[in-house]
Amino acid sequence: MAVETCEYELVPHRGFTLISGTHDPDDVDQIQDLEIRDSDVFVVTYPKSGTIWMQQILLLLEAKGDLAAISRLSSSSNADLIPWIEVKGIRQTFITAPSPRMRVTHLQYQFMPSALSQKKGKVIYVARNPKDVLVSYFYFHKLANMLETPKDFDDFFEKFMRGDVFGCSWFEHVKTWYSHKDDMNMLFITYEEMIQDLHSAVQRISVFLEKELNPEQLANVVKHSTFNNMKKIPKANYEQVSDGLFSHHEGRFMRKGTIGDWKHHFTVAQSERFDQVFQREMKDTPLRFIWAI
Ligand code: A3P
């Protein structure tokens, strides 16, 4: 049974939600059986945690920092070049794609190829402090036509706390993936670490992916993946993606790119309630986030 009423609906599926029109449940169920090559890379995120940023970094690492080489590729967005494995039709194209096959996903752990747990392929999990995720997701609901526009911030706050959004509960997503960190070849990195020291983050990612870049190439990867530079890149802003999917007049994909924007949106009561839930839900994990700088 659908839980939302809009052109695209959130449809519960095996403890998660899919978006009708974008995802096909049968297709999603077959992701588990995919054969995985050691060179495969999956970027896993809860929505609004830095997916497009990691796509940009991976594309640049592959191109040895040469932004022009990426611009020349025929695609309308970063997501065309490193697509979502759960989107209709992508699983099929993954099977025969040449290596290295790089894909992103917002799926929960239970849907992912079981071969990943036999240490095949690589997984990069990007986590972001959930207060900023909530704010970013609120604005994204206005921009993205496949998600229902929230009535107001308070309404969206409640939905997020209930996990009544695509991606379901942020707490479950992060906890579950983190608990499987050592079963697979996983780099677990936070958005805040990337903000605070992008050069070190890019270095860690390149070592993890076994990419050998010289210092100049590495510096170019960093340069072309800063917020200010990505803001100017139409492919990173989905600007060439049709109005059918995005209401471009409602805002930009590259919105603020900071730590702590939640302080301009949460009331004191909302923040305190959030902290209590965070402490309860995350008490058994060592994960700590940076909430402001
Ligand atoms: P804000 O809405 O807070 O600005 P995703 O790609 O997972 O949907 O995440 C989008 C969020 O990541 C947006 O957050 C976007 O601005 C931010 N982001 C994208 N590229 C970034 C970069 N280079 N530096 C900092 N933040 C970035």
Image: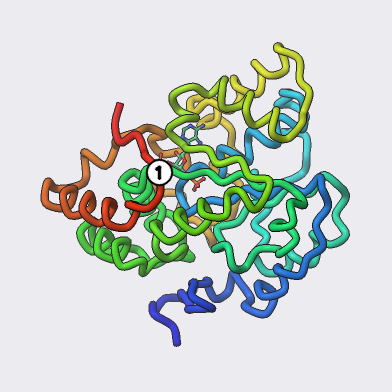
Tag 1 residue: 286
Image point 23% across, 59% down: which residue? Answer: 152
- Pinpoint residue 141: horizontal percent, then vertical percent: 39, 58
Farthest residue to the left: give it.
269
Name the quarter where the C terminus is drawn: top left
- Pinpoint residue 17: horizontal percent, then vertical percent: 49, 72
For badge 1, the amino acid type reads Pro
Disc 1: CA contacts within 10 A as few (<14), some (14-19) or many (>=20): few
Look at the picture and state if 30 lies above or below 273.
Answer: below
Look at the picture and state if 110 lies above or below 124.
Answer: below
Q: Nearer the viewer, residue 239 or 166?
A: 166
- Pinpoint residue 2: horizontal percent, then vertical percent: 44, 83
Would residue 279 be found to the left or right of residue 230 on screen? left
Look at the picture and state if 26 lies above or below 82.
Answer: below
Q: Secondary structure at mark 1?
A: loop
Would residue 37 be found to the left or right of residue 223 on screen? right
Image point 23% across, 53% down: which residue? Answer: 274
Residue 80 visible? The answer is: no
